[in-house]
Image: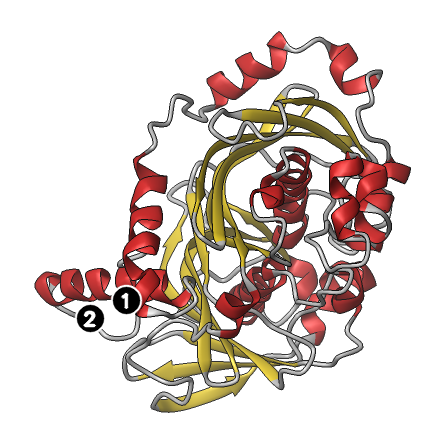
Amino acid sequence: MNAKQFVIKKSKSIRAFEILKETEEEVRRYGDALSTRMAEMQKMAAALPQIPRKTTFTFQNVKRSIQKQSRKVFRTQIWMNETQLAEFANGSMAACFGDEYLIYEDRRHPRIPRGELMLMSRIDKVIGERHQLNQSAEIYAAYDIPAQAWFGSEHSKNEIALAGYLEMALQPCGVLSAHLGTSLVHPEIDFYFRNLDGELTFFELPDLSGETINVYGKMTSTVVGADTILQRFDFSLSMDERLILSGNTVFGYFHPKAMAAQRGMESVETHQFPLTASEPLPVAWIHQRHGEQRALMIKEATLYAAKANPQTIVGLYEIDANDWFFKAHFLHDPVMPGSLGIEAATQLMELYAINKYAGYNPEQLTFTPVTEEKVSWKYRGQILPDDNEMLVKVFIIDEIPDALDPNEVKIIASAEVWKDTTKIYEISNIQYLAKMAEIEHGARL
């Protein structure tokens, strides 16, 4: 759990008490909000992190794992092709996973994204048996990146939107979970499938345009409750045995009552916090840098000088039931991907960098994630078609000029995503490198 508070500083003893309180609230929030189930859900939440992790995702370990696999695994053996993946996204579950899934033919069931949001071309290999949830399982997937994609950039071919990386890494986890028959533990429940937490580290940022990305996923643990199931996964992305990123994440299967009981994250503030000065940031700068391929998740952006935090960027996105991502994510369960909320935060950081370091000229900036630094996220709510607006707040924690290159600055931030007046996401340690073609360093500090 993220213990950092970037708006109001507190003593360690007060924060320790709040961490304990937040833990209890999160368990209650996702456990049907009934006091009789509190003990069971506390046990589930405590059990998941205690499962020993045998694999450490370092560059050397992941590369060694990839090298052990024959190239035929990634190129010739196809466990599920693109047509079958589309069937999983849009059609019959039984056609994909067998007769056990006939019970879901006329019911809503967890799916994978569809259309342009489905970032999988095929599943090459799965290692793991159905109903063996007490054992780890693995999946090997591949994605052939098109020349033009919603997460790409016309400005720089290695400036992939963070949402694109997240979707590539996480989507095979849903395929593996379905193959294992996770929902069949409680076949009477029409589960919702949601990402809860995660963290990832970049290692390399190659040009991915037109390349094939290999995705590795491993289900490391499953905890089953009366009507809730939690699963932890490790994941990595690689290209030609070059490790791009690795991380881990938690997904949950939730009863409809648990989803209805969501109350978001408790916060010491509302989104209407005291501000002393403001400056609008043109969102058109994102399109100037990336063209129409990038998913623009901000309609209005403002830079504030707030009393509690000198540099705060606030962005607003008005929710439209016809937004493209609702149609793609998911069949019979329209919800905005959490990755797009994180993407909105990175776009606000990008606007901030253009404004401060590139002399208002988007073409003068290159903006890429910092490698070997861990970014983490936590979701405790969702954006639905009938919501009004998404408000994103980015808090600039530090700006570190490169000691050798005066045209490079590392920007470190945290972020929050709010649905109307409820905080639903937290993103920690977002680090990006702003590289300027020309800069009068310190002129706008």
Residue 151 is situated, as x and y percent measured from the top left of the image, at 73, 53
Q: How is the image coloured?
A: secondary structure
**Residue type, label 2:** Lys
Whether residue 304 is situated above or below residue 416 in the rendered picture: below
Mark carried by residue 5: 1
Mark carried by residue 9: 2
Residue 84 is situated, as x and y percent measured from the top left of the image, at 86, 37
Mark carried by residue 350: none
Residue 201 is situated, as x and y percent measured from the top left of the image, at 48, 39
For the N terminus, the quadrant is: bottom left
**Residue type, label 1:** Gln
Q: CA distance from mark 1 to mark 2?
A: 6 Å
Q: Residues within 10 Å of mark 1 (few under 14, many from 20)?
A: few
Q: How many marks?
A: 2
Q: Residue at x 66, y 66 (%)?
A: 336
- The answer to whether the residue labelled 1 contacts the one labelled 2, judged by CB atoms less than 8 Å apart, is yes
For the C terminus, the quadrant is: bottom left
